[in-house]
């Protein structure tokens, strides 16, 4: 029975700086993690042949309920900007954005503050 795995390819700093490489992710179906890793490597190099000349870190994890994942069999660079690998949970988690203290929603202010 096939499972869904989240797969990411993250370039090293040199590849990013000199080659303009970006991190990409996809979700694939495979029987187990070993097969998912092999399938991902093959598909990645087939889709990005120039990546052979760059150093990438490959991360594979089984899809779990409640964690974000890219669409099946499509390459997604935005996913890697919106999510990061968390070693502790061994899964991808959303990137925490810093709230802008100068950006205030007027409707969420208390009535006495709105009237001031």
Image (tube, rainbow, N blue to C red):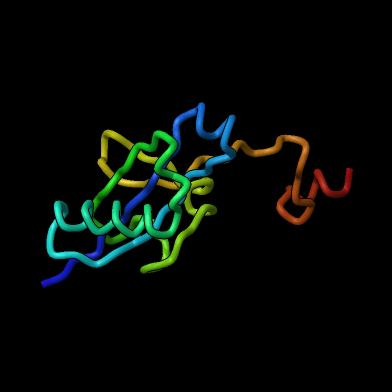
Viewport quadrant of the N terminus:
bottom left
Give the farthest residue toward the right: 116
Q: Nearer the viewer, residue 77 or 91?
A: 77
Give the farthest residue toward the bottom: 1
* Location of residue 97 (image quadrant): top right
Q: Residue sitting at 16 percent across and 53 percent down?
A: 33
Vertical side of 59 occupied by 29: above or below:
below
Q: Residue sitting at 53 percent across and 46 percent down?
A: 81
Residue 38 image position (x, y, % from top left): 21, 54
Residue 98 image position (x, y, % from top left): 60, 36
Tell whether 102 sits left or right of 96.
right
Q: Nearer the viewer, residue 77 or 68?
A: 77
Q: Nearer the viewer, residue 72 or 14?
A: 14
* Location of residue 11 (image quadrant): top left
Give the farthest residue toward the left: 1
Vertical side of 71 occupied by 86: above or below:
above
Tell whether 111 sits left or right of 32.
right
Residue 102 image position (x, y, % from top left): 77, 36
Residue 106 image position (x, y, % from top left): 79, 52
Q: Residue sitting at 38 percent across and 37 percent down?
A: 56
Give the farthest residue toward the top: 14
Q: How many marks?
A: 0
Tell whether 113 sits left or right of 83.
right
* Location of residue 84 (image quadrant): top left
Q: Residue sitting at 38 percent across and 58 percent down?
A: 46
Viewport quadrant of the C terminus:
top right
């Amino acid at each position: 029975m096939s499972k869904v795995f989240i797969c990411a390819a993250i370039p090293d700093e040199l590849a990013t700086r000199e080659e303009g490489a970006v991190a990409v992710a996809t979700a694939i179906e495979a029987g187990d993690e070993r097969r998912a890793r092999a399938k991902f490597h093959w598909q990645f190099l087939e889709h990005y042949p120039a990546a052979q000349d760059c150093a990438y870190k490959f991360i594979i994890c089984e899809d779990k309920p409640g964690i974000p994942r890219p669409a099946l069999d499509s390459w997604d660079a935005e996913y890697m900007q919106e999510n990061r690998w968390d070693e502790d949970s061994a899964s991808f988690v959303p990137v925490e954005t810093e709230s802008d203290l100068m950006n205030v929603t007027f409707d969420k202010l208390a009535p006495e503050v709105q009237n001031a």
